[in-house]
Image (cartoon, helix red, strand yellow):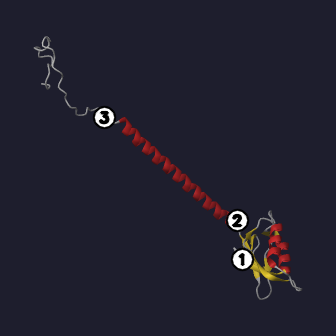
Amino acid sequence: TVCIRIKHKRDVDVLFDALGGDDGLQLVKDLTLGDAETMDLIDAQKSLAMVGDQVISSGEEARLEIRKQHGLINDDGRFQKSVKLAFFNMSAVHDSVGNIADSIKKGDEDKKKKAEDEEARRQAEQDAKEVGQLSYYPTARDWHVPEEVAADDTRRGDARFVAGGAPQ
């Protein structure tokens, strides 16, 4: 990123002569702006991204923003207010933003998978609670003494049948 201030109309003319590329904002050659005291060098392939605090997307928009911000121009072409310009290496910006976007996307996918796994675990626990014990072994039971049978029941004297009371 290179940030500079331009103070002269001739700097604007030199700047727009050096801009080109697909969007009209990329420097097609190295650029030197300013006077002997404050000379700025900007490498080719950087793109004009901001004028002042405004993000721009075309050459016409850049010209309009520069006109808005410089104020009056005196007889020798000097601006009343200097205009701030920011140049970015857009390929590096796209790469870093792409990497950040990829890592955010991967993090979101991991969070989603983790939430789905947690939901499946909770559902399995809930199902297990609803089904109850899945063991084939019988659980301990309380013995309820059967009701008394009638006196004329023929099974009463037979040892093969239970005739009331606790099991023997």
Residue flagged by tag 2: what amino acid is it?
A: Ser
Q: Where is residue 43 in the image (x, y as percent from the top left)?
A: 75, 75
Residue flagged by tag 1: what amino acid is it?
A: Cys
- Mark 2 vs mark 1, CA separation in Å: 17 Å
In the image, farthest residue toward the left: 157
Category of crowding for the residue at label 3, using alpha-carbon neighbours closer than 10 angstroms: few (below 14), some (14–19), many (at least 20)? few
Q: Name the residue under label 2.
A: 91
Q: Name the residue under label 3.
A: 135
Q: Nearer the viewer, residue 9 or 41?
A: 9
Q: Where is residue 82 in the image (x, y as percent from the top left)?
A: 78, 81
- Front label number (2 vs 3): 3
Q: Which residue is drawn at 29% across and 32% down?
A: 136
Relative horizontal placement of residue 50, taking residue 134 as reference (left or right): right
First in sequence: mark 1 vs mark 3: 1
Please give the label number shown on residue 3: 1
Q: Where is residue 74 in the image (x, y as percent from the top left)?
A: 87, 85
